[in-house]
Amino acid sequence: MNDWPEAWSDDNRGNRGNRYGRGSGSTQPESARVMRQVRRQPGGPGGPQAAPPYGGIPQQPTYDQGYGGYDSDYNTGQVYGTPGGGPQGPGGYGPGPGRPAPNWGRRIKWTAITLVTLLVVTSVATYFWADSKLHRDVDLSKVIDRPAAGKGTNYLIVGSDSRAGMSDEEKKKLHTGSAEGKRTDSMMILHVGDNGDTLVSLPRDSDVEIPTYKGSASGKVYQGKGRHTKLNAAYAEDGPELLVRTVEYNTGLHIDHYVEIGFAGFANIVDAVGGVEMTIDKGFKDKYSGADFKAGKQTLNGEQALAFVRTRHAFATSDLQRTKNQQKFLSALAHQVATPSTILNPFALYPTMSAGLDSLTVDKDMSLWDLGSMFWAMKGVSGGDGTSMNMPVSGSTGGNLVWDKSKVKTLVDELKNDEKVTVTGN
C-alpha cells in the first residue's frame, strides 16, 4: 500500500471532509485491522455485540499481554502495580503481596554488628589515647635492697606540692605559695587483694630513718647513717625513688606501683568532674591553705577541694586530722567520677580522663589496667568494702610522729599475706 496515494496533492489537502485516512486512496474508511494483542469485547464476529458504554463511545481495547504489569492494567489506572495487576498496598502505592516483606531480623543483626564494631573501635582508640597521656617518669628499678613481694598489689599514692607549670596568678588563687622544688603533702599505701582492700595514710610528719640508697640521677650509692627525719623530707632529698626506698625500709612492705599528682592537677580533676559533693562535720578556717568552710553538705570546686585536703593548722592533731580529711575527700571524689552522669557522658568522661591522666606521674611499669584497678579499689574502700586507716602511732619525738612498731609489724604481715586487716590506726 502506498503511504502517499497519487490522488493526494497540495491542491486538495485542505479538502479533508470526505477523507477518512491518511494511508488510503479511497474515500471510504479502511476496514478494521486485526492486532494480535487486542482482546475484543464479548460477542465476536457475527455474534451479538455489547452495547457501547460511555454514551455510545466504544471502549478502548485492552491487551492480553503487558510488560511488567503496565499494559495489562492501564485501563484500571494500576499502571504501577505488581505484575499482572495484583493487589496494591494502602492507597495503591505500598508493597503488595507480590513484594516480600522487609527482613527485620537481618536489619537488626546488621545494626547490632555495626554498633558493636563502633564500640570496639572507640574503646581501642580511647585506650591508646589514654595510654599515651601517662607520664611514666619513675623508675623503680633504681630502688635497691627491696623487700620480697607479697600477695596482692601495693600502690604508693602521693600528693605533692609541685607548682610546675603554674602561673603566679594560679599560685595565688590556689594559695600554694612559691616555694621551689616539691615535697609530699600526702602519702598513702593502697593494698589491693582478694581479702579486702586497705588504704593506709602515712602522716608526712612521720619519724623515719633514711636508709642507704642509690641516687636516682647520679647513680651514686649514699650510705645510711641512722639519720632520722620527717617522711616527706625523703622525697625532697632525692625524689620518688628515695621515698619508695624509705617507705619499704621502714615498713618492710614491697611497693609495686607509684602514683603522684600535683596541686594544679588535683584541682583540675575536681573541676573537670563538675565539683565534688561532700558533708563537712565541723566548719574550719585556715589562712595558709585558704580554707573557709561551714558545716554541712556542699559541693567543692577545685580551689576549695585543694584547700580542704591541705589544711592542717586549723586542727589540734594537725597531720592526723589532715590525713582523715584526705581520705574522706578521695572517697567522695571516687564516687563522683564513677557516677553514670560522668561515665556515660562522653562530654564529662573525656575531660575528666584528660585532666587526670595529664596530672599523674607513675612508674614505668604502670599500665592502664593497673591504674583502673587502683581507682576501683579506692572507690570500694571509700564505699565501705575495705579498710581505711592511719598508720598506727604511739607518740612523738622532736615534733615527729613515732609509729607503733608492734602494730605496724602486724599490719604489714597481714598485708603481705593478703589477710583481713585487724589492726586499727589513729
Image (spheres, rainbow, N blue to C red):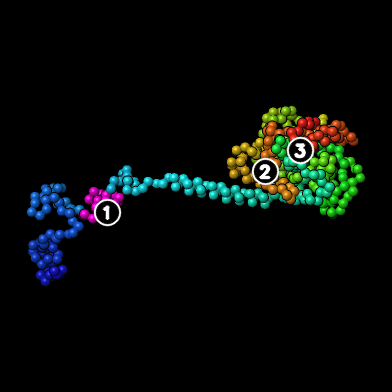
Tag in front: 1 or 3: 3
Marked residue nearer the N-terminal end (1 or 3): 1
The residue range painted magenta reads 63-85
Compared with 325, 107 (above or below) is: below
The kind of residue tagged 3 is Asn
Whether residues under marks 1 and 3 lie with C-beta atoms below 8 angstroms apart, the answer is no
The kind of residue tagged 2 is Gly
Q: Residue at x 77, y 31 (%)?
A: 422
Q: Which residue is mark 1?
A: 70
Percent position of residue 367, x then y: 69, 48
When asked about the image quadrant of residue 410, the answer is: top right
Is residue 283 visible from the viewing direction of this image? yes
Residue lying furthest bottom: 6
**Residue 134 horizontal side relative to residue 37, left or right:** right
Q: Which residue is mark 3?
A: 417
Looking at the picture, tell me which residue is in the foreground, 202 or 367. 367
When asked about the image quadrant of residue 302, the answer is: top right
Q: Classify mark 2: residues with Cα within 10 Å, few (<14), some (14-19) or many (20+).
A: few
Residue 372 got which mark? 2
Percent position of residue 179, x then y: 81, 45
Is residue 388 visible from the viewing direction of this image? no
